Each structure stands twice: as C-alpha cells, then as structure tokens.
Image: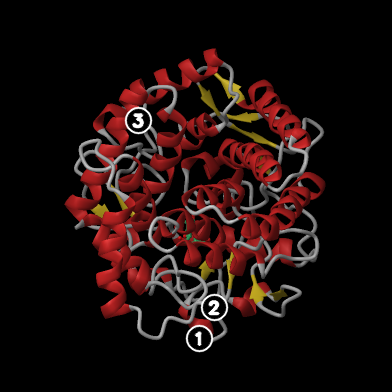
Amino acid sequence: MIARDAVRVLVANWDGSYTVPSRRLYPHQWSWDSAFIAIGNARWSPRRARVELLSLFGAQWRDGRVPHIVFNPAVPEGAYFPGPEFWEARAPSGTSTSGIVQPPVHALAAWQVHLADPDPAFLRRIYPRLVAQQHFLRTARQSPEGLMSIVHPWESGMDNSPAWDIPLAAVVAGPMGVVRRDLTHVSPDERPTDRDYERYTALARAYRDTGYREAGAFAVEDPLFNAAYGAAESALAKIAAACGLDPAPHHAEAARITAAMVEHLYDDGLFHSRDAGSGILLRSSSAAGLVPLILPDLPREIVNALIGTALDRFEIKRGLLPSFAPGTPEFDPARYWRGPSWINLTWLVWQGLRHRRADLAELLADGMIRAVTTSGFREYFDPFTLEGHGCRDFSWSAALVLDLLCQHGLDGVPASLREVGEERRSLVETHEIGDQVPA
Ligand code: 2M8
C-alpha cells in the first residue's frame, strides 16, 4: 500500500517531463528534488526517471550551471515567489530559470537510475552534462583550499538552517516589498520568518545584479554541498567506466575533495561549514555535517566519530535523522530545516551507513517507513512524534520511500520490482491517461 500511495503522489505531481515537488507550494521544477525524484521513479518507471533528469539538464546554462529552479511558463508569476520576473534569467534553451544552484546530487541519481534499469545510451547522453555541472563548480566556486562555496542559503537546500544564522545576520536587507506565497500554503510557524526572507531576497538580487557572477555577503563552504560534489565524482567514475571512458580523473577528484573536507571542515565528530571569506569555521549542529558519510573513501576513524555523533547528539536510534541536533537551543521540531526530519537527509545518511553499520541503516529505513505510514508523504516530520509538517504529497518523500521499499522493504524484506510494477499497472489504468512523456 505504501508503494502504491507513493506512486500515486508521483503521478499526481508529474507535469509531462518532470515532477513538481508540491503542486501548490513549489509549482515548478527544482534541481535536487528532480534528482531524488528520479531515484524513486526509476523503481517503477525508469523512462520517467530518465526524462526527469534530461529535462532538468535541458535548462543547463552554457557555463555548466544547473539552475535550482526551472520555471513552467504556464504557471502564473504570482504562484511562487521569487518567480521568473525576479530572477530575469534564461537558459540557452529559452526557458526561464533561477541563477543559483543546489547540491549536485544528480550524478548519484543518474547512476542509481542506470542500476535500476541499465541504459548505456542514457548514460552517454547525461555524462557530459554532469561533467559540465562539476566543471562549473570547480571554476566558479572553488576556494584556494579546494572547497566549493555556496553564495545563498537556497543553494544549500537547507535554507532556514541555524547553521546560516551567523553568516546571514551580516546581510544588510531592507523590506522585501513583495508578498510571500509560501505562507498561503503552510503555517508561518513552520516556515522561515519575514526577516529571513528579506535577507534571502536581498542576497539573490545582489547576485543577479552581477550577472550571477560575484558572490555577495554570503559565501560559505557547506559540508553537504561538498559531499555531494565528491560523491558525484565517485558516481562519475562509475558512469565513465560504463561508457568506456577513463574513470581515473574522477577517482582522483573524489579523493582530493574528501581530503580537503577532512582538513578544513571537520572538527570534533562533525563536519561544519566554513566562511569562505574569513576562513573561520562556522561550528553548528546541523545534520549537513553527517552527510559526508556518503563519501565512499572517508577515513575509517572519521566515519566512526560521525556515527558516534549521529547516535549521541542526533539520537538516530529513534529512527529518523533530525535536521538539527535536539538538545541545542536552536532546535525546533516543527520549523522548516531547524530540527524536523526530512526523508532526503535521512535517506542520504542511510546510504552512507548501509555498508558500514547495517544495524543502524536498518533503524533509519524502518523510521522513514514509520514516518510516512503515520503521517503521509509530508515535507518534514517531528523526529520524536513523527507528526507531519509543511506541505502534503511531497514528491521526494514519496520517491525516496519507494526506493527504500525496493532496497530494504517492510521489516527488512525488500519489495520485489514485480510488486511495485503490479501496483503501478493498476495506477496506469486510472491515472496515466494523457501522459506526455516522449518515448
Ligand atoms: C525549499 O526551498 C525553496 C527555495 O529553493 C523554498 O523555500 O521556496 C527547500 O526545502 C529546498 O531544499 C527544496 O529543493 C525546495 C523545493 O522542495 O523547497
């Protein structure tokens, strides 16, 4: 039943060549959402998964950046703020986009999609685009220490995290002068404050006014973003080998970024962000600091220390990973990115633990399944009560749980692809009429 309900959410949020994260709150295509969604779609419609990624990369800029939002021209400007009129940006394809990026989890997704349904032609098509995405980050965002910077909290994917409280406080911002749309759909107690939005808007405007070239008052090296970049190189090594190309440069780059992260971002059982301007470590208790567990070659002693932190400070034995450590003054179990659990972060850490601590990975898998059976495919969950928050029918919650069911299953018994396929067929009959996916 969960698989069936997950597919139902993904079908309802499908827009013909990509999936909206949420019909009302996020009515366009988002970059890292599409990657997570493709991982889930690969389990029941690999063709959709491939189309989802290729449509996102269809809006890639000439410099290689993959914009964090690709706008649907059929959606009215007022449906989401900031919309295309604010960003004033277009991809070479002519599509309106934003001008910032999100964590590069797409190579990881492309490889997972290929594993679920091997398709060398897809790999050959997406590989140069993934390489260009990494190249953009290396050339436009790399610090002398060899780490990649983000220039806006939205680029972290965890924009309201307490990790950004200090660097964001330095951003000078006047009133927004526009109406926020998010508060029409979700309670203000579960979203960022107006003050935060003023700063987000000011930062995005300043970056836009440099032609999306110069970082403004916010430039940080985030562990989640850098871990995604490193894991992308490891995935690209596998993709290159499958395409008959040389994987060695990707292995070398993955090793290089892993070493740079350990040297500059790691301290006392957790990875932290670093201010790219001052070089100061921005110590916080964000779960972003555990995501480097996705790096395949993280030194064993660091892995062990991260696991210790996950157990003590993040209490993952409860089954979900809180986005910020409980027991800290900033922790809030219901406010977006300040404590609630998200399926994508929990899934990433689950991936990192599967081959290192299968017992803990199993607890997280069961926890994610419990969360969605208790509260539905909500955007985020109270890590203790599992109460759902944010929007409903959130795509990556559905997609990643679907992937989880195929890999881990209920009570550790993976659902066979046939079972998921059967559920899909019954949905196809009722819901897929008019599906516009090109063959
Ligand atoms: C949230 O971010 C957008 C801005 O990009 C927003 O608040 O309007 C974040 O949770 C982000 O990680 C996610 O990609 C996006 C769409 O789900 O929503």
Q: Which mark is residue 76?
A: 1
Whether the residues at callouts 3 and 2 have beta carbons within 8 Å, the answer is no
What residue is rendered at 28% in x and 42% in y?
414
Report helix, strand or loop for mark 1. Answer: loop
At label 2, which amino acid type do we have?
Answer: Pro
Choose the circle earlier in sequence order: 1 or 3: 1
Which is more foreground, mark 1 or mark 3?
Answer: 3
Q: Which image quadrant for residue 172?
A: bottom right
Choose the circle earlier in sequence order: 3 or 2: 3
Q: CA distance from mark 1 to mark 3?
A: 42 Å
Quick check: can you spot residue 335? Answer: no
What residue is rendered at 47% in x and 31% in y?
352
Q: CA distance from mark 3 to mark 2?
A: 37 Å
Q: Camera-side residue: 124 or 362?
A: 124
Report helix, strand or loop for mark 3. Answer: helix
Check the image and report above or below for 13 versus 217. Answer: below
